[in-house]
Amino acid sequence: MLSTTFRQETGNGHLSASPPFTDLNNLASAEVGAKILFATDDFFAVAENLLNPAPPEWKEGVFTAFGKWMDGWETRRKRIPSHDWCLIKLGVAGIIKGFDIDTSFFTGNYPPRISIQAACLDNDESFPERVSEIGTCPTEDQMKQAESIESQKWVEIVPRSNLKPGYTESCHNYFTVSENSRFTHIRLNLFPDGGIARLRVYGVALRDWKGFPQHEMVDLAAMVNGGTAVACSNKHYGHPRNLIAPGRAPNMGSGWETARRLDRPAVLRLREDGCLDVTGNEWTVLKLGHPGIIKKIEVDTNHFKGNFPDSCLIEGCIMTTEEEQKFTSDQEKFEPAWRTLLPSTKLFAHRQMFFTSTIQDCGIISHVRLTIFPDGGISRLRLMGYLRSLQDNALPSKLSGLN
């Protein structure tokens, strides 16, 4: 049986050594709207590079007017009393579970130590105007404006900690966060200076659903609404959390894609329903941002032209936190009571597909399982529906009439 957790084989065939929180959503990706509000120095490379969702690059022999081209945020060597820091607005406010501070390629110029602070702010009105340009630093007035925010008093969620150099075997610096508050902004402190390639802020979006009308349809699985990828059978080429990312996928790498199954039939044949007759499949389980009733589904295979799944099946269930933990730790010991939401359905290449009439009523659910046959890639999954409390399951006749 394939593993139900994310700690499985990576593209190079080795087991992933990353902690479990790295399977959560990145709240500080530029793709979801995260941005640098202030940085004390951008001499060698601008702080915006920290938020780039793509892996860091190395360009041999490439130099700028200020020094070696580096794919990250790199400050000048400090020659004045101070240390460097930057302020970041998260793309999605939420609960932070952990950080990956990636020092890739910064082998002799990474910061010896860092710390991270966080706050929940209402707006950005007091932040100075940001100029993102290498070779620059804030003016005296901008520095005073930034210091007036008193971000040094924000909650410290990662104490001063050592970093490792950016070699392949040591570039990922993981830090777990125990604070369960909702945060909108973070302050990254370098002690005293240096370069970091990427900053990943893993967590769960925390939306305020208070007052949201029960008759208004919303994407219950969306990352921005608190949806998360809980488990999967395979993520060889792309993580299933990409399914619930905002917008349409910019490329094939921004979707969920599995390896080709080795148990594919030698000669493929069709079933009577027009789908391929295969026994193998791949799957992922998503936790909705809020329990609800699903009434409209979008399956988008954008960019997947020669590697889309032949068909898919979507099921729903209710799982408590304890049951979810049992499921992710050992599927053989706990199997949720899955109910069919979208029966086996033929898929097509590079296309947005919408389903309403074929959706089956499976009541209020908290989790969905997307199963693809036999393998392949899907870029986005949208599960549109109505918010409901789990206690509303006692009133099926009242709720089932919604459309």
Image (cartoon, rainbow, N blue to C red):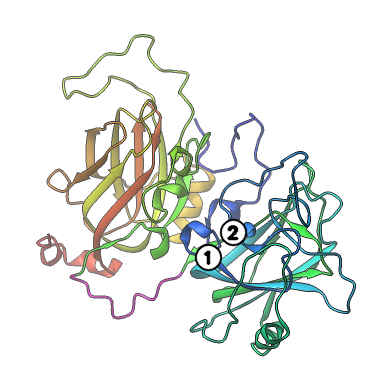
45 up-or-down from 86: above or below: above
The image position of residue 277, as x and y in percent, is 28, 19
- Total tally of numbered discs in the picture: 2
The amino acid type, in three-letter code, at marker 2 is: Leu
Quick check: can you spot residue 307?
A: yes
On screen, residue 255 versus residue 403, left or right, reads right
According to the picture, the residue beneath numbered tag 1 turns out to be 34
Query: How packed is label 1: few (under 14 Cα within 10 Å), some, or many (20 or more)?
Result: many
According to the picture, the residue beneath numbered tag 2 turns out to be 51
The image position of residue 301, as x and y in percent, is 33, 38
Q: Residue furthest front?
A: 65
The amino acid type, in three-letter code, at marker 1 is: Ala
Secondary structure state at the residue bearing disc 2: helix
Q: Is residue 208 magenta?
A: yes
Residue name at image x 82 percent, y 61 percent? 111
Q: State the extent of the magenta-drawn residues as a range.
A: 206-215
Q: Residue furthest top?
A: 267
On screen, residue 88 versus residue 59, left or right, reads left
> Which mark is drawn over residue 339?
none
In front: 271, or 331?
A: 271
Image quadrant holding the C terminus, namely bottom left
Quick check: can you spot residue 200?
A: no
In front: 251, or 263?
A: 251
Secondary structure state at the residue bearing disc 1: loop
